[in-house]
């Protein structure tokens, strides 16, 4: 099966004017302007198969949004190549635009003072939907997101979570096969984040859509993505399964024990990281977990024991630091 998204040595550079503060420097810059070259994306390469949901991660300024804008056709690359669904995005072929969507968190596409349903009617005209296609797509999205009570309310009266759900439905009215999602849950409360995640997963399952998702909320990534692509300073630093990332960059595990044993007793088995009234946590190498667990159970009175991987946020922060 051919990749649905192919990115090869993609680059986007910007020349940014620089000058020192002050009036004199401002005047000098008029006749002798200096520039810095900012490498927003610096040779990114990856492939995505049809139907995959990929987490596209990186710290602020890593180049995530710039990459999504090139893949959606909003920006021309400085060099390199990319194809999506067999199209070159920056050529903005109408047939391509009908099969993809770009959703950016807290960017408003709805008509602010009108009911949400009026913007849906505008989308119907833009995409040239027939009556049956429009109603079928609209009804399916309203059902998936529970939007029926919101369609007649002015957009300015919707909460942020309600508006984001409606924005999602509007962006998917044309049933795109590729979704570029840039921080779709940013600023939402926990309940709204959960609803958006469930909707993305349901849409992927129902229509076989391919999803490239950026998010700083690791709950989004853990719930939706089996594979992640991480970039930093415009280059790919990791491409693989989420479990592989944890194994590679977090070789230790923690064992938490409720026991009558002392801190000194458990320190014989690993590094004690927490000790609170009979609940003691030690850190050991992943390969040693079975042996250490068996030794603790054999040597001490234990009422409860648990083995935990490090939080994914800590693992990803460690990768960024490298």
Image (tube, rainbow, N blue to C red):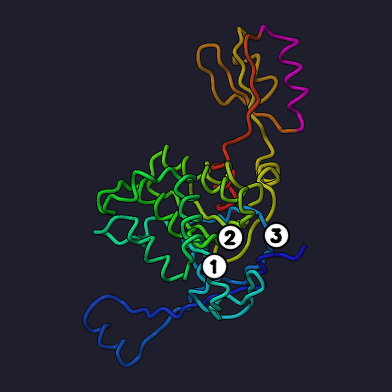
Residue under label 3, please give it: 49
Give x and y (percent) for residue 146: 43, 43
Q: Nearer the viewer, residue 288 or 66?
A: 66
Instruction: Check the image and report above or below for 87 versus 31.
Output: above
In the image, is residue 60 above or below residue 252?
A: below
Q: Which mark is residue 67?
A: 1
Q: Earlier in the sequence, mark 1 or mark 2?
A: 1
The residue carrying pointer 3 sits among few (fewer than 14), some (14 to 19) or many (20 or more) residues within 10 Å by Cα, namely some
Q: Please tell me the numbered disc located at residue 291.
A: none
Where does the N terminus fall, quadrant-wise?
bottom right
The residue positioned 57% from the left and 56% from the top of the image is: 56
Horizontal and vertical percent for residue 110? 34, 60
Tag 1 near tag 2, CB within 8 Å: yes
Please name the residue shown 23% across and 84% down the image.
24
Coordinates of residue 300 in the picture (x, y in percent): 69, 8
Q: Is residue 302 magenta?
A: no
Quadrant, the C terminus: bottom right
Disc number lying in front (1 or 3): 3
Residue beneath disc 2? 231
SS of the residue under disc 2: strand
Which is more foreground, mark 1 or mark 2?
1
Earlier along the polypeptide chain: callout 1 or callout 3? 3
Q: Is residue 7 left or right of residue 295?
A: left
| Apparent side of residue 284 relative to residue 158 in the rendered image (left or right) | right
| Magenta highlight on residue 292 | yes
Residue 308 placement: quadrant: top right
Label 3 or label 2, whichever lies nearer to me, is: 3
Local crowd size for mark 1, using a 10 Å CA cut-off: few (<14), some (14–19), many (≥20): many
**Could you tell me which secondary element the residue under label 1 belongs to?**
helix
Instruction: Decide if residue 192 is on the left or right side of residue 176.
Output: left
Q: CA distance from mark 3 to mark 2?
A: 19 Å
Which region is colored magenta?
Answer: 287-301
């Amino acid at each position: 099966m051919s990749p649905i998204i192919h990115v090869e040595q993609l680059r986007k550079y910007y020349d940014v004017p620089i000058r020192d503060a002050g009036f004199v420097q401002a005047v000098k810059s008029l006749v002798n302007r200096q520039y810095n070259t900012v490498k927003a994306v610096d040779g990114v390469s990856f492939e995505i198969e049809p139907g995959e949901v990929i987490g596209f991660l990186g710290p602020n300024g890593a180049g995530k949004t710039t990459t999504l804008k090139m893949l959606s056709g909003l920006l021309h690359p400085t060099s390199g190549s990319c194809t999506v669904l067999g199209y070159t995005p920056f050529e903005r072929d109408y047939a391509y635009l009908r099969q993809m969507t770009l959703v950016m968190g807290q960017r408003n596409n709805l008509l602010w003072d009108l009911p949400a349903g009026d913007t849906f009617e505008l989308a119907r005209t833009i995409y040239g939907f027939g009556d049956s296609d429009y109603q079928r797509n609209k009804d399916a999205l309203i059902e998936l997101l529970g939007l029926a009570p919101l369609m007649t309310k002015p957009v300015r009266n919707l909460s942020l979570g309600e508006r984001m759900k409606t924005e999602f439905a509007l962006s998917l009215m044309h049933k795109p096969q590729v979704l570029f999602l840039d921080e779709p849950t940013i600023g939402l409360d926990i309940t709204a984040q959960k609803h958006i995640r469930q909707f993305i997963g349901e849409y992927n399952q129902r229509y076989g859509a391919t999803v490239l998702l950026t998010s700083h909320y690791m709950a989004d990534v853990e719930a939706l993505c089996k594979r992640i692509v991480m970039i930093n300073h415009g280059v790919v630093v990791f491409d693989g399964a989420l479990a592989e990332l944890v194994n590679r960059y977090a070789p230790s595990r923690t064992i938490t024990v409720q026991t009558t044993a002392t801190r000194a007793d458990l320190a014989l088995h690993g590094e004690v990281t927490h000790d609170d009234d009979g609940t003691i946590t030690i850190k050991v190498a992943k390969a040693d977990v079975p042996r250490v667990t068996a030794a603790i159970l054999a040597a001490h009175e234990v009422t409860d024991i648990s083995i935990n991987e490090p939080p994914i946020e800590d693992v990803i922060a460690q990768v960024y630091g490298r």
